[in-house]
Image (cartoon, rainbow, N blue to C red):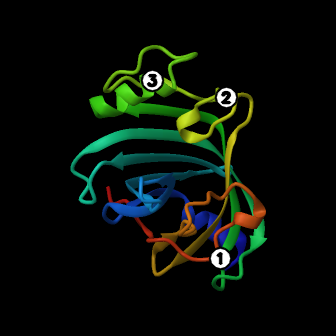
Amino acid sequence: MTLDDLKTQLLGDWHSLAPELRPSSLKNPDGSLKPFHLRREFRCLAGDCFELAITNFADPLGRVPLARMLIRGHMAWRGDHPIAPGAQKVDFVADQAYEVTPLLQGFADVLNQVAAAGYARWAVGGTQSVFGKTFAPFGLVEGRHFMEHDLVHLRHGLLFWGARHIDGRGFDSEENRPTNLQIPLAPARH
């Protein structure tokens, strides 16, 4: 498959098959990594644009939503990735939007303690833009776009990205680009 074929097949809406588990960079009191439960909704648009909505959950079954993040931006294609034939290195750059919506009072309360400066009071269901601003809970720095050095692979009609590192490291550099495949996204059916 050529890169142009991949880009064409990628166009459209994709979603998590079920709630997903990932390691976070946060640790429990015993030093183990805290689990991170989420669902992803990804839309690939023409012109190498994307939208990604992530809903985080307090439980592994995805019944207690904590927060929803929406990022919009561009994909920069960086060449073949050795993980599988046809896999491509891609950088996701949130250079258009980054929004956060608390969905549980406890999470809104935490944001009001750790991310109050420069924001209105955080409230359940209240969406605020963190685009271009410092937002400590997600490691965002004022004036810098969030970016991940990731990968994309299409196989059997499913969309694979890179699996999170088991030590919780993000994809914040070329050296931290993933080397394994994550649980896939399925095409959305309308």
At horizontal 47% and vertical 62% (from top left) the residue drawn is 23
Which of marks 1 and 2 precedes in the sequence?
1
In-image side of 4 versus 188 (left or right)? right
Q: CA distance from mark 2 to mark 3?
A: 20 Å
Quarter holding the C terminus is bottom left
- Residue behind mark 3: 113
Which of marks 1 and 3 precedes in the sequence?
1
Between label 2 and label 3, give the one nearer the viewer.
3
At horizontal 71% and vertical 71% (from top left) the residue drawn is 3
| Mark 2 residue element | loop
Q: CA distance from mark 2 to mark 1?
A: 31 Å
Where residue 98 sits in the image (x, y, percent)? 56, 35
Between label 2 and label 1, give the one nearer the viewer.
2
Please tell me which residue lies in front, 102 or 82: 102
Checking the image for residue 132, the label placed there is 2
In-image side of 165 versus 112 (left or right)? right
Q: Amino acid at mark 2?
A: Gly
- Residue behind mark 1: 87
Where residue 4 sits in the image (x, y, percent)? 70, 68
At horizontal 49% and vertical 39% (from top left) the residue drawn is 70
Q: Amino acid at mark 3?
A: Gln
Q: CA distance from mark 3 to mark 1?
A: 42 Å
In the rendered image, the vertical position of residue 147 relative to residue 181, given as above or below: above
Where residue 155 sits in the image (x, y, percent)? 51, 80
Q: Residue furthest bottom?
A: 85
| Mark 1 residue element | loop
Between label 3 and label 1, give the one nearer the viewer.
3
Callout 1 crowding tier (Cα within 10 Å): few <14, some 14–19, many ≥20: many
| Mark 3 residue element | helix
In the rendered image, the vertical position of residue 123 relative to residue 18, given as above or below: above
Quarter holding the N terminus is bottom right
